[in-house]
Each structure stands twice: as structure tokens, then as C-alpha cells.
Image: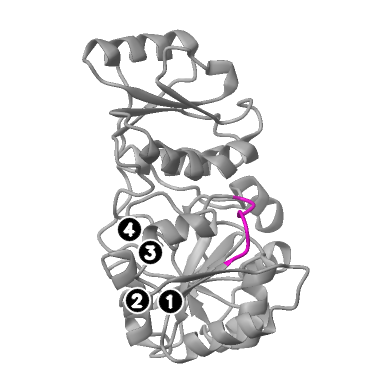
């Protein structure tokens, strides 16, 4: 299969390109498209065969549910049994945006491989002009996980998608680099108070301002991942080829770690704020000044992917403060490192 990556210019009418994408989706194909978080790989959420192509392209197990994307907040009334008042307030406050809301789905509406056999479904309305235009024209719900090979860092550019899925999908709508760079917050509104299952750009304090009490994510060790309600809860994710280790953002600690790695005849790539740059690192990727967590989040996946362009034996990544989006960053880093911390 030839994969076509087509640039979507926001200043140009792309009627033909959108029509091609819609026709492919309605014919049971998959299409990659940008959102404000990462690129998604979409299939119509009521078409089980089409959704199966998403799992096949990604090489992903089908026992994780998929997030369903809608183009209008009123659309979800067609898909769920009821919308609690707290969910309505969050929809008003954060949609379109990086918040996925889990609700009880109407029976037998979505393909079973979208919900992974659960009675619930996660829905969100993305805040990206290309995604919204595609959904507006399609008039169907799109099940869309990140458009990458399973386990690899999520794609934040069309080129990342092309690298991972060339020959596996027919079309990539390339809308440029994504803005946030981390997947959406996932919150379960089938319980009260709501529970955050995956942290993201909409933080717990932001939710509390709108609805009051919210339960924060459990630690990796406490989570029951046997039947996950949200993506990203069951397997290692976001990892480059070389093993990733998390490390404190202290120059002396980083220097000692690099020296130890070199003594073992290995090379190291360091992802850290510029204030923690260590000249002994074989490769260095800047995560900004260490204070701007939005900048850290936006660049993280691209830098993890860039590590695969090196010959590094080990990747060291400094952990951020857990204020704001820092909680989401640490969540992704723990997945990328499979819980491994560098301990000298």
C-alpha cells in the first residue's frame, strides 16, 4: 500500500483533499490526521472492520479501548446513555480541547473493538482546525488512537506518522506540528467524584475549578490494568529503541551517571533542560529552561524519536516538577522508562 502524505494549508481551501479523506473513511479505510495533542489514526467508530485496520497498522493489541472523536459537543447525546451535570460543565469549559470524558455508551452502537468490550466509551472534541473540518464533513464519530507503531513515542508531526506507518495506511493529512505534544487527559465520569485515568493538558486543578472534587491518578503500581478503561494504561509506551532511565535534574547526579555509563563502554543521549546540560553526554536534546513545562511537553516525543537517529546505548531523561502538566509528563516518562530510574 502506498502512503500519501498531503500537506493541509490552513490558508487554502482543501476541498478535494478533505473529500478524498472522507471518501476513504466511509469506504472503511483509515486516515491519519493532526489534533492539538498528537496525530491520530482514525476509523469510523461504528465500523468494526475499519477499526481492525487501525490495530493492524499500529501493531497494537486490541484489548485497549480507543478514544472516539466528535466534531460537535452535542453529538455525544447520540452516543451515550446520559451526561452527568459535572460532565456537561467540563464539556462547556474544555471542549474543544485535550479532555476525554468517559461515559456509559449506548448498547451495540460502537464497534466492540472500540470499547474493548466495555460498557463505557471515551469521547473528546479535538481543538485543531484540520481535525474539526474532517469531522464536520464526515458527520461520523472517529475512533482514533495515536498514529504511531505501538509502543513508540506518539507522533507530533506528519513526518513522524510517515516514518512509522509508511505502506500501512493510505493517507496522512499533514497539518504541521501539534501544539500540546501529549495525549489528552482522560477522566471517568461514570463515577462521582470523577477519576482521572490519564493526566494530560487539562490538569486536576483545572477540573477542580469547574466541578470540585476530582480523584487523581493512582500510581503505576496501584492501577488495575487488567481491564483498562482508557488507552495507555496497560503496556509500556512512548519508548525509543534504547532503554530509557529517569534521573534527577541535578548536574552532579547526571555527570556521575554519564561517567559510569562511559566506563561500561556505552554511549548516552541526555534529554534535559539547558541548565542541566553536561558536556560529557554523547548527544544532548534540550527540554527548554526547565521552568516552561508546556515547552518540555511539546518537545518530549520529538526528542525521544530523535534518539533513534543516534547510536546511543542508553537514554537519560530528567524528570520535571509535577506542577500543572508536569504530572502528565512524568506519567509518559514512567511509561517510556518502564518505571526505571538511574541509581548509581
- Residue 127 in view, yes or no: yes
The image shows residue 156 at horizontal and vertical percentages of 53, 53
The image shows residue 107 at horizontal and vertical percentages of 40, 89
The prevailing secondary structure element of the residues shown in magenta is loop
Tell me what residue is drawn at x 32 percent, y 66 percent.
64
Q: Which mark is residue 170?
A: 1
The image shows residue 90 at horizontal and vertical percentages of 66, 64
| Circle 2 Cα neighbour tier, 10 Å, few/some/many (<14 / 14–19 / ≥20) | few
Residue ID for mark 3: 165
How many marks the image carries: the answer is 4
The Cα–Cα distance between marks 2 and 4, rounded to whole angstroms, is 19 Å
- Residue 344 in view, yes or no: no
- On screen, residue 253 above or below 165: above
- On screen, residue 71 above or below 91: below
The image shows residue 5 at horizontal and vertical percentages of 52, 68
Q: Earlier in the sequence, mark 4 or mark 1?
A: 4
| Circle 4 Cα neighbour tier, 10 Å, few/some/many (<14 / 14–19 / ≥20) | many
Residue ID for mark 2: 1
Closest to the observer: 88 or 7? Answer: 7
| Dot 3: element | helix
- On screen, residue 100 above or below 46: above
The Cα–Cα distance between marks 1 and 3, rounded to whole angstroms, is 9 Å
Residue ID for mark 4: 150
Amino acid at each position: 500500500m502506498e502512503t500519501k502524505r498531503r500537506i493541509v494549508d490552513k490558508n487554502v481551501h482543501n476541498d478535494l483533499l478533505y473529500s478524498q479523506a472522507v471518501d476513504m473513511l466511509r469506504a472503511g479505510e483509515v486516515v491519519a490526521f493532526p489534533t492539538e495533542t498528537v496525530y491520530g489514526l482514525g476509523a469510523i467508530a461504528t465500523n468494526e472492520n475499519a477499526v481492525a485496520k487501525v490495530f493492524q497498522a499500529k501493531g497494537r493489541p486490541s484489548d485497549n479501548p480507543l478514544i472516539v472523536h466528535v466534531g460537535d459537543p452535542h453529538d455525544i447525546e447520540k452516543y451515550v446513555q446520559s451526561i452527568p451535570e459535572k460532565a456537561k460543565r467540563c464539556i462547556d469549559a474544555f471542549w474543544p480541547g485535550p479532555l476525554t470524558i468517559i461515559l456509559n455508551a449506548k448498547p451495540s452502537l460502537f464497534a466492540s473493538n472500540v470499547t474493548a468490550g466495555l460498557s463505557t466509551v471515551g469521547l473528546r472534541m479535538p481543538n485543531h482546525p484540520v481535525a474539526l473540518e474532517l469531522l464536520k464533513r464526515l458527520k461520523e464519530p472517529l475512533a482514533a488512537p495515536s498514529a504511531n507503531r505501538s509502543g513508540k513515542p506518539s507522533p507530533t508531526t506528519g513526518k513522524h506518522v510517515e516514518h512509522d506507518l509508511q505502506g500501512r495506511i493510505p493517507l496522512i493529512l499533514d497539518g504541521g506540528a501539534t501544539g500540546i505534544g501529549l495525549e489528552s487527559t482522560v477522566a471517568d465520569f461514570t463515577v462521582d467524584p470523577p477519576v482521572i485515568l490519564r493526566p494530560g493538558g487539562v490538569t486536576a486543578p483545572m477540573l477542580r475549578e469547574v466541578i470540585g472534587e476530582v480523584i487523581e491518578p493512582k500510581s503505576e503500581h496501584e492501577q488495575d490494568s487488567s481491564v483498562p478503561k482508557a488507552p495507555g494504561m496497560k503496556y509500556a509506551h512512548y519508548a525509543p529503541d534504547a532503554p530509557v532511565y529517569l534521573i534527577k535534574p541535578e548536574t552532579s547526579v547526571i555527570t556521575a551517571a554519564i561517567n559510569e555509563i562511559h566506563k561500561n563502554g556505552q554511549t548516552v543521549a541526555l534529554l534535559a533542560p539547558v541548565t542541566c546540560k553536561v558536556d560529557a553526554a554523547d548527544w544532548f536534546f534540550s527540554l527548554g529552561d526547565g521552568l516552561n513545562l508546556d515547552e518540555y511537553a511539546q518537545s518530549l516525543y520529538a526528542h525521544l524519536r530523535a534518539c533513534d537517529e543516534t547510536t546511543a546505548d542508553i537514554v537519560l531523561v530528567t524528570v520535571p516538577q509535577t506542577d500543572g502538566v508536569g504530572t502528565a509528563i512524568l506519567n509518559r516518562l514512567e511509561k517510556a522508562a518502564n518505571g526505571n530510574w538511574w541509581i548509581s
